[in-house]
Image (tube, rainbow, N blue to C red):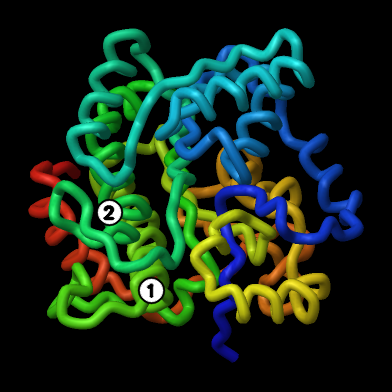
């Protein structure tokens, strides 16, 4: 069964009702290893899943670089984390994943300060906005969700590769199940469907994660793995672009039954980042239709596992961001 319910993977939507939390799932973070002495970058870290991942990693003793588009919001989130974890080692750095120049500036700034990177979590994203072209001339969802992270990974790859037992985690979505890569209209210039463009961007993220795994393995980089995760249906502010009528219907009907809080939606990402994982593993909730539930290994669609499609997308992405790697 294919489905798409537009609550997904970034930030808490305060308009949504608070539902009873599944404490069994939330407590699974206690079984994950401590991360003292390790450095993490989390994009989109000031809110939602990114915030929850940053908080959990700080509790585990990691140094967390909170890569945020808004320094003001990032610093506010950092202060909130410090109140919960007074000794947290968290730093805010500015990045805009919808700007290739901003991504390059971030990578340069990071590498001027640090010579290692244990885990890169490509979390930031946007969902179903009105049609928008970025300064680079690309459709907003494709660039912010996929192309920006593709470039960021490439720019930081040398630093990651020289860090033992490092990982790169890409965030996908169950919306990838409805996604297709439309090479004839990749930027949705001929026809724009917000949900189709979102599904395309999240399919691209998963194709990227799997192809990155294959290329790392082929190149003999055994100390670095690529994994992926999705949050199921988490109650996030990504729903802000939904039609109000549709939002209201979902909010008071199916949402309480099918969604879970960002704290729970973030757990598959944590498992992909610091849990028991191998290259190419994909994690998500294992309940009904992967909407919510205990985190575990899940499978992508046939398109997500299409190696020829992934190779073509990789080559197109290299052209669009102006960088080749692996």
Q: Secondary structure at mark 1?
A: helix
Q: Is residue 244 left or right of residue 67?
A: right
Quarter of the image containing the C terminus?
top left
Question: Based on the displayed image, in which of its 4 quarters is residue 36 positioned?
Answer: top right
**Residue 226 % position (x, y):** 42, 47
Image point (22%, 82%), residue name: 191
Mark seen at residue 143: 2
Q: Is residue 121 left or right of residue 24?
A: left
Question: In the rendered view, would you say 176 is above or below 16?
Answer: below
Question: In the rendered view, would you say 111 is above or below 161?
Answer: above
**Residue 159 % position (x, y):** 31, 23
Image point (27%, 61%), residue name: 132
Numbered disc in front, either 2 or 1: 1
**Residue 258 % position (x, y):** 76, 73
Camera sees residue 169: yes
Image point (48%, 20%), residue name: 92
Nearest the eye: 70 or 205: 70
Mark seen at residue 263: none
Question: In the rendered view, would you say 313 is above or below 73?
Answer: below
Question: In the rendered view, would you say 73 is above or below 139?
Answer: above
Quarter of the image containing the N terminus?
bottom right
């Amino acid at each position: 069964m294919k489905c798409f319910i537009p609550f997904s993977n970034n930030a808490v939507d305060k308009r949504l009702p608070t539902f009873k939390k599944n404490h069994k799932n939330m407590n699974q973070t206690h079984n994950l290893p401590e991360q003292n002495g390790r450095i993490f970058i989390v994009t989109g870290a000031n809110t939602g899943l990114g915030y929850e991942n940053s908080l959990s990693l700080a509790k585990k003793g990691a140094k967390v670089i909170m890569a945020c588009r808004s320094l003001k919001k990032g610093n506010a989130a950092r202060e909130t984390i410090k109140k919960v974890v007074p000794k947290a080692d968290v730093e805010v750095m500015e990045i805009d994943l919808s700007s290739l120049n901003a991504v390059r500036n971030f990578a340069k700034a990071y590498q001027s300060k640090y010579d290692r990177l244990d885990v890169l979590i490509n979390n930031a994203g946007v969902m179903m906005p009105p049609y928008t072209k970025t300064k680079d001339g690309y459709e907003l969802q494709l660039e912010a969700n996929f192309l920006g992270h593709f470039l960021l990974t490439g720019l930081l790859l040398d630093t990651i590769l020289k860090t033992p037992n490092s990982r790169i985690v890409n965030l996908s979505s169950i919306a990838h199940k409805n996604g297709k890569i439309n090479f004839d209209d990749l930027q949705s210039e001929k026809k724009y469907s917000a949900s189709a463009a979102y599904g395309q961007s999240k399919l691209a993220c998963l194709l990227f994660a799997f192809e990155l795994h294959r290329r790392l393995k082929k190149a003999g980089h055994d100390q670095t793995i690529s994994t992926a995760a999705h949050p199921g249906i988490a109650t996030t502010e990504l729903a802000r672009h939904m039609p109000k009528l549709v939002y209201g219907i979902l909010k008071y009907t199916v949402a309480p039954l099918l969604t879970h809080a960002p704290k729970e939606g973030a757990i598959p990402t944590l498992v992909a980042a610091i849990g028991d994982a191998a290259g190419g593993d994909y994690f998500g909730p294992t309940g009904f239709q992967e909407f919510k539930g205990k985190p575990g290994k899940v499978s992508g669609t046939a398109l997500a596992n299409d190696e020829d499609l992934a190779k073509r997308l990789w080559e197109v992405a290299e052209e669009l961001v102006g960088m080749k790697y692996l």
